[in-house]
Image (tube, rainbow, N blue to C red):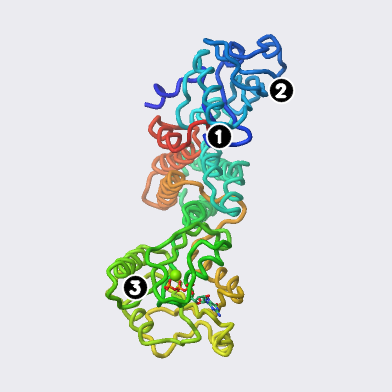
Amino acid sequence: MISEQYTPDEPIVAIATALVPSALAVVRTSGKNSIELVSKCFSRPKALNDAEANTLVYGWIIDPKTYEKIDEVILAVYKAPKSFTGENMVEIFCHGGTSTVLGVYQSLLASGFRSAQKGEYTFRAFINGKADLTKAEAVREIIGAKTDESRRRAANRLQGALYTEIKTVKEELLKVLASIEVGIEYPEDEENFSETFDDSFLKNIISKLKILHNSWQAEKLYQDGAEIVLCGKTNAGKSSLFNLLLKEERAIVSDIHGTTRDFIESYVSFDGIPVRLFDTAGLRETKDEIEKVGVERTKELISHSDAVLYIIDSSCGFTDEDEEFLRNFTDENSKTSEIPIILVFNKIDKAGFLYEELKSNKTVPLEKLPFRQNIKIFGVSAKTGLGVQELIKATAEIIQKSCASVKDGTGLGSERQKDAIEEALESCEHALLCTKEGFTLDAAVHDIEDAIASLGELTGEITSSDILEAVFSEFCVGK
Ligand SMILES: Nc1nc2c(ncn2[C@@H]2O[C@H](COP(=O)(O)OP(=O)(O)OP(=O)(O)O)[C@@H](O)[C@H]2O)c(=O)[nH]1
Ligand SMILES: [Mg+2]
């Protein structure tokens, strides 16, 4: 249970930065008596104990058992309630060598701190009223953000945009509740209630909840990202395009067919969407056993991808092998038939005429192909970069599909939040039904109260230990 695991006020310590050799590192403490405890292993205990809130103190961390000087440090002193956790806190800025950081950490443990659990600092911020659950989850999100756009969305939630939106909906629900309760107080009017009750307010709330609910699909994409596979015949230029998109010479490029034998992957941003991009072994019939495995792996990757960029060497044109592969791929009985595919004619620097043709006729399927979808066609040059930005933009649009993207930071930040909105939405829709003839007003009141409770769970005003456990166990130690 979370309440047993996280004991507020108890002095805790964690290494807040990655344990890798670096210029500086941060070791973080929190708890009622954290300042006194740090002073037990600090060269200037009086200076620390007398320090004002929000000040820095210079000195050395000293092993409290051996009195060995561990490192020259700066301490940042925070006093309750004006700190991240709402408790007294000391953050130690030390040098970032692994042995140094561990030495500082061990000295603090020996002085009376215990190791912090995952997410324990943010949990304390939550229970001390410094952050609601949407902000707490945004902290985790901002740490994991893979692109600038993912980070921007998380930062908006951290600033409270989503919390404010939920609070507004809750206040509106309270007004609806009051107007229904008036009907209950004057039972003689109850029969006419369905005619006199203005349901536009409730309908407006329902549409706001629907927008919130729909926002999750897009937000999830910005958090988890999409998988995109570069595939096509050997020598088409897959690895060249992969390197260009990554802006580094990651994959080996050569004019020998079958250069890439196993897939390589890396993260890139496609218009702000984090994309796990795969460069794969070229598709061809081969007797080479290793290459065969590579081709099978390509097919396996394609089967669970979000989109496929099928690369064609436009100097060779669209060949029978390309046709056969795409025929299998787009066959409605195959499990890949729903995966969006984009035909990318590469090497247009060598075959510019084709690019011009394609430009004027971009979304029309080639007559040769039995396409079950209106496949987009692009011309690029992995050598010069021509057409690549256009390709990125179009691919981002395709993987976003019909995701309703909310730009102002009021999109939902987690599956848990989506579930809570779903419950609130169901309750509101039922309440709307109850205000019509044939239902008692008590039932409508009950539904609205349920909806308010669901929104309370979302922000954390009403929480079970299970919810808290689920939220905070996904954090890293030190946050
Ligand atoms: N002119 C020109 N040459 C290109 C372009 N893209 C790739 N090439 C060349 O085409 C050859 C094959 O490129 P790769 O990127 O290795 O092709 P691949 O599809 O990864 O090939 P495999 O790994 O064998 O499947 C290399 O000599 C590249 O320099 C392009 O846009 N224009
Ligand atoms: Mg290759």
State the image quarter where residue 170 is shown. Answer: top right
Q: Looking at the picture, which amino acid does disc 1 mark? A: Thr
Q: Which residue is label 2 attached to?
A: 56
The crowd level at tag 3 (other Cα within 10 Å; few <14, some 14-19, many 20+) is: some
Alpha carbon separation for disc pair 3 and 1: 45 Å
**Is the distance from the Cβ of mark 1 to the nearest ligand 2 atom less than 8 Å?**
no
Q: Are marks 2 and 1 in contact (CB under 8 Å)?
A: no
**Is the distance from the Cβ of mark 3 to the nearest ligand 1 atom less than 8 Å?**
no
Q: Is residue 50 above or below residue 193?
A: above
In this rendering, which labeled residue sits more in front, label 3 or label 1?
A: 1
Q: Which residue is label 1 attached to?
A: 17
- In this view of the protein, can residue 196 be seen by the observer? no
Q: How many marks?
A: 3
Q: Is residue 281 above or below residue 275?
A: below
Q: Is residue 209 above or below residue 57?
A: below
At 54% from the left edge and 88% from the top edge, which residue is drawn? 354
Q: Which residue is label 3 attached to?
A: 337
Q: Which SS class for mark 1?
A: loop
Q: Looking at the picture, which amino acid does disc 2 mark? A: Leu
Instruction: State the image coordinates of residue 46 (x, y, percent, origin top left).
Output: 69, 9
Q: Quadrant of ligand 2?
A: bottom left
Q: Which SS class for mark 2?
A: strand
Q: Is residue 215 left or right of residue 282?
A: right
State the image quarter where residue 161 is shown. Answer: top right
Instruction: State the image coordinates of residue 378 (x, y, percent, origin top left).
Output: 53, 79
Q: Which mark is residue 307?
A: none
Q: Is residue 358 above or below residue 223?
A: below
Q: Earlier in the sequence, mark 3 or mark 1?
A: 1
Q: Looking at the picture, which amino acid does disc 3 mark? A: Ser
Q: Earlier in the sequence, mark 2 or mark 1?
A: 1
